[in-house]
Structures are given as structure tokens and as C-alpha cells.
Amino acid sequence: MATSEITDDLPPEFAGRVSAATLKDGRALIVFDAAGLGEAERAAIERDITARLSARSDVNDVRVVMTAERKAPTLIAIGSGKGGVGKSTLTANLAIALARQGIRTGLVDADVYGPSQQVIFDAEDAKPDARDNRMIPVETKFGVRMLSMGQLVAPGRAIAWRGPMVGNALAQMIDAHWDAEDVILIDLPPGTGDVQLTMVQKYKPAGAILVSTPQDLALIDAARAGQFFDAAAVPVIGLVENMAGYACPHCGEVSDPFGKGGVEAAAQRLELPFLGRIPLDLAIRQGSDAGEPPAAGDSAQAEPFLSIAGKLAAWISARS
Ligand SMILES: Nc1ncnc2c1ncn2[C@@H]1O[C@H](COP(=O)(O)OP(=O)(O)O)[C@@H](O)[C@H]1O
Ligand SMILES: [Mg+2]
């Protein structure tokens, strides 16, 4: 008996939520994704399905499995002390690299002051739909669904929002229909402002990754961001050094415009894991600007992101 035949007896609005439907020896089994539905609604749906299928002459037993008890996705925050250090670049490429490793990954661009993920993901025109008053993350061509502040407001408009509005926007993006994701990476604004506060108070991440360039000033700010997460009891998964070692595209000579190894030394001092180093590489910037993040390809530029994603995946699986 083809499963499509028993789903024909269910209301069409259930279609997106029925993840399995089988009929064997008169026994019907329906697996229903009830994520986000209330107790009463769930019970009503279960009764409805049971009644409809029991009415069939070839069915004498109906079992409905509700999978609302799905584990909530693991939230991982990506932070930095200051802007322009490559936080968004790292977040996008880590999300893509995790997805390539088979981890269902979503991304929230919570940088209210300078959202950029819709550019990196080549999803500038994508506007999220809503269902039951909750946003549905937009699909991207990289196997990562996402929501960005940049999709919620007119492009180019400076967002000078105050605390409650910022918290509200963050809530909309995190309470969205993340029903298919295991992990959500959150691209935070720089520093330790309203978004970070709302985050740790209402949507406490499982862990945070801090990005810094090797300059002393960036490092001091990164250490401060680390203290913030520490105080909020959010474990710092580790530090990433970005824009280290510039390989000249003409002669190949490697120089260190912002110094080198500073982040690794700082991680040691702060007794935090060092997750890896991403070189300053023109191809990384060009790829990001063009909506072709390097982690999606097989160039040398993908390698550090894949390596850091592997460490993040190990951290996540060790805690669950
Ligand atoms: N490793 C890198 N090599 C070259 N350019 C980079 C690198 N990391 C980031 N960039 C570029 O630097 C700029 C700032 O990076 P971004 O990720 O937007 O920083 P943040 O989110 O911390 O403000 C962007 O133009 C980005 O493409
Ligand atoms: Mg950014």
C-alpha cells in the first residue's frame, strides 16, 4: 500500500508536517512534526488523524507519533571585541563548513548595526515568510537557512535601535521556525551591548567563539568580550585569529601586517582553547563580497574554516 494513499485522507495543511506515513497489515503509522504547537492543538490533530484513518476499511489500528519533543537547536554565538575583525566572514564560512559535515546548520545575523550575511549568502532579495506569526528562515544555495536583520529593514538604512527593539528583533529571529536545524550560529554585533545582554538573559547560547585580529587593541577588546561571556556563564569554546599572515598574490611572500600569533598567545594567557588561524587573503574578501564564501568551495581558502568547523562540531557533540 503506497503511503501517499493514506496521506490523501489527511487535510492538505498537514502535508508539510507529516514526516512519515505507513500502512501495513491494517496498521497505520503517522509521524507528525508538532514543533511549535500547543498541547491542545496537538491533541486535536491526533484525534483528527485517528478519526480520518480509522474510517478507512483497510485500517484497523492507528498510531500517531508527535515529534514536537524535538531537541531545540544548539545556539552558538560568534562574538568579537570590535568590528571589522572578520566575525561575519567567520560565521558564514563556519555555518557552511558545518553543513558540509552533515550538521544541519542555520544562521542568525544579529548584528543590528551592520548586518552583512544577506550579502555573503547572496540572499539580499530574499524576504522571510511567516507561519503562525513566526518567521520562516530563508533558504540559501549553501545548504544553510538564515535570517538577517538586513532582511527585515530597508537596505542601507542605519539601524539605531534601542534596547527593547533590539531585543524584539533578536527574539523574532531566534524564535523562528528552526525546525530542521541542529545548530544555529549567531553573528553578534561587536562588543557587549544590548543584543549580547538579551542573548544571555533570554536565549543563552551553549557556547561562544571569539574572533580577533592579532593587534594588541583588538585582543584587549576580545578579552573583554570573553569576560562578558564568562560572567554570564556562557562557555567560551575558543579563540580564532583572523587576518594573520598576508600572502602577496604577486610574489607569494608572507608578511604579517597585523602581527602574528598574538591570538594564540592570548588564548594561552586566558586559558582558552585556540581554534585556528585564518590568513589575510584577498580571495576571502572577494568571495564574501561576491556571495561566494570560500568554505563552499574546494580552494585552499576553505581549509582553515573546515578545520575550525571540525573543532566546533567536536565541541558540540561532546556536550550533548
Ligand atoms: N581573512 C580575511 N582575509 C581578507 N579579507 C577578510 C578576511 N576576513 C574578513 N575579511 C574582510 O574584511 C571585512 C570585514 O570583515 P567582516 O567579516 O565583515 O567583519 P566583522 O563582521 O567583524 O565586522 C570584510 O570586507 C571581509 O570580507
Ligand atoms: Mg559583521
Image (cartoon, rainbow, N blue to C red):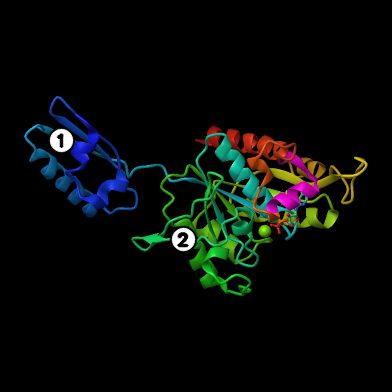
* First to last magenta residue range: 272-288
Which residue corresponds to the image point at 80% horizontal and 47% vertical from the top-left?
A: 281
Q: For mark 1, does the 10 Å Cα neighbourhood hold few (<14), some (14 to 19), or many (20 or more) residues?
A: some
Q: Is residue 227 visible?
A: no
Q: Amino acid type of disc 1?
A: Val
The answer to which image quadrant residue 245 occupies is: top right
Image location (x, y in percent) of residue 81: 72, 57
Q: Secondary structure at mark 2?
A: loop
Q: Nearer the viewer, residue 36 or 245?
A: 245
Q: Mark 1 CB in 8 Å range of ligand 2?
A: no
Question: What residue does disc 2 label?
Answer: 128
Mark 2: amino acid: Pro
* 220 with respect to 65 (left or right): right
Q: Using the rendered image of the protein, determine whether residue 278 is visible from the camera's viewpoint.
A: yes
The residue carrying pointer 2 sits among few (fewer than 14), some (14 to 19) or many (20 or more) residues within 10 Å by Cα, namely: some
Task: State whether residue 196 is above or below residue 263.
Answer: below
Residue 179 within the magenta-colored segment of the rendering: no
Per the image, is 286 magenta? Answer: yes
Provide the residue designation for mark 1: 62
Q: Quadrant of ligand 1?
A: bottom right
Image coords of residue 295 (percent x, y): 66, 41
